Image: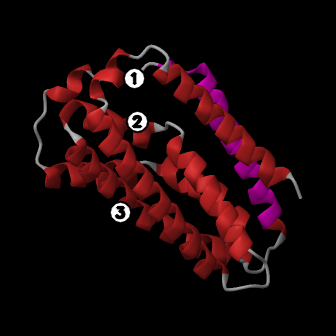
Amino acid sequence: MIESLVSFAFATLLLAISPGPDNIFVLTQSVARGSKYGIAIASGLITGCIVHTSVVAFGFAIVIRDNEWLLYAIKIAGAIYLLYLAYKIVKSDASIEFGAEKASNKSLWKLYKVGITMNLLNPKVTLFFLALLPQFVIANSYPDWIQIYLLGGIFMLVSLLTFYTIALLAGKAASFIKSSRWFAPAMKWVQIVVFIGIAVAILIP
């Protein structure tokens, strides 16, 4: 069980540091406004993950309880979904836009609520959790829903600490990030490698 949790924490760290919509948003807000605004948004994003974890925990437990074969189907579907995300990133533009972010001057509380809303209104987060979390559930161990909540908690903790770090560093390195030509393309390919790597790990028995 401990070995599985450590593996999951490492996979979560790789995902958290690879650029996706959430940490790119935290990055841009921190660069444009300052670290504390990025931290407010990150807190909201992670708070929203509690709802998605609950959906996956209870939905997964109910569906898998009497249909173990579905676990294998979910593994395959999860790997395909992660590969699809990698493909979408390959086809996407690697640029990161900062320009319009300075216009708004919302309070920290409002930005926190923006983070929650962004997360809750994005059904892809639930799909992503469904693709990832069940892969680390251990059969004949603790109840599935408890394991999902534990994994979700690790995901949120690791992601929150990573997002906070991004916010703090981005606020201090704003001028470098804005002027760098290689930063965005490099981060794009890091994300592609991470998604493909996790998809392959899911498919390996």
What is the distance, in whole Å, between disc 1 and disc 3 at their CAs?
25 Å
Q: Which of the 4 quarters of the picture holds residue 88?
A: top right
Q: Amino acid at mark 3?
A: Thr
Nearer to us in this view, 112 or 190: 190
> Can you identify the residue that label 2 sits on?
24
Q: Is residue 55 visible?
A: no
- Is residue 135 one of those drawn in magenta? no
> Can you identify the residue that label 3 sits on?
47
What is the distance, in whole Å, between disc 2 and disc 1 at their CAs?
8 Å
Q: Which of the 4 quarters of the picture holds residue 148?
A: bottom right
Q: Residues within 10 Å of mark 3 (few under 14, many from 20)?
A: many
> How many numbered discs, if any?
3
Q: Amino acid at mark 1?
A: Ile
What secondary structure is found at the residue carrying circle 1? loop
What secondary structure is found at the residue carrying circle 2? helix
- Residue at screen point 72% across, 77% down: 1
Q: Earlier in the sequence, mark 1 or mark 3?
A: 3
- Looking at the magenta stretch, what is its main secondary structure? helix
Residue span colored magenta: 71-94
